Image: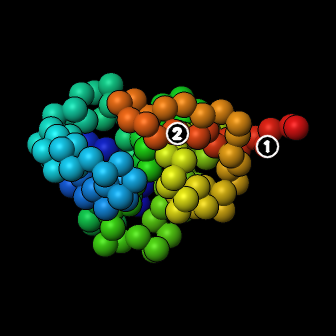
Amino acid sequence: MIRQAEKKDLSRIGEILVFVKRIKFRPIFQDDEYSFNELQVLSVVEKYKKPEILNHIWVYDDGIVKGLVHIEGKEIVELYVDCFFQNRKIGSTLIEFALGQGCSYLWVIEKNTDAIRFYERHGFYLTEEKKYEEGTTEFLVKMSTQKEKS
């Protein structure tokens, strides 16, 4: 079910990333130029085909690639599930896989409350750390499996 991504998965990875980002992030960023001109399957494929990225991506594949998780060291860099297959435990399977690989933190858009609730259900806590999403006025917040002491 979960396996390392291969070159043959690139178009599917591109589709998932483009459509989920448009649906989830366009309402937050309100940036049509990015959402519909810059964010294209071909440009995503071009970026993700680099071994330094592709070699860190794992896909949920049950005959159809339905989701992906991008892991760098202890960080979950990205976790996306195709909109058509959400609410079927695919995201949960991917996050549990990442935790099993030693992941312990991630960054999430502060206004993405659905994602924050999802990660909290899987043992992540909001930390006090935040930073701007590059090129925007929106914040990313750090979530960790370690609860901060106050």
Question: Residue placed at 70% from the left, 54% from the top?
Answer: 123
Give the residue drawn at x 18%, y 44%. Answer: 33
The furthest residue to the top: 52
Query: Which is more toward the observer, 27 or 20?
Result: 27
Q: Looking at the picture, which amino acid does disc 2 mark?
A: Leu
Rendered location of residue 41, percent (x, y): 15, 47
- Label 1 crowd bin: few (<14), some (14–19), many (20+), radius 10 Å: few
Secondary structure, mark 1, is loop
Q: Secondary structure at mark 2?
A: strand
In percent of the image, x 30 and y 35: which residue is there?
54
* Sequence-earlier tag: 1 or 2: 2
Q: Quadrant of the C terminus?
A: top right
Name the foreground residue: 141 vs 144.
Answer: 141
Left or right: 95 with respect to 146?
Answer: left
Q: Are marks 1 and 2 in contact (CB under 8 Å)?
A: no
Which quadrant is the N terminus positioned in? bottom left
Structural crowding at the residue carrying mark 2, measured as other residues with C-alpha within 10 Å and reported as few (<14), some (14–19) or many (≥20)? some
Question: Residue at horizontal 66%, vertical 57%?
Answer: 120
Residue 111 visible? The answer is yes
Q: Is residue 149 left or right of residue 79?
A: right
Q: Which residue is mark 1?
A: 147
**Circle 2 sits on which residue?**
140
Q: Residue furthest right?
A: 150
Is residue 133 rendered to the left or right of residue 54? right
Pick whichever, 72 or 119, lies toward us: 119
Expressed as whole percent of the image width and height from the top left, the position of residue 6 reads 25, 42
Picture coordinates of residue 136, whole percent (x, y)? 38, 35
80 displayed left or right of 116: left
At label 1, the amino acid type is: Lys
Q: Quadrant of residue 73?
A: top right
Query: Measured along the vertical axis of the image, is residue 56 above or below residue 114?
Result: above
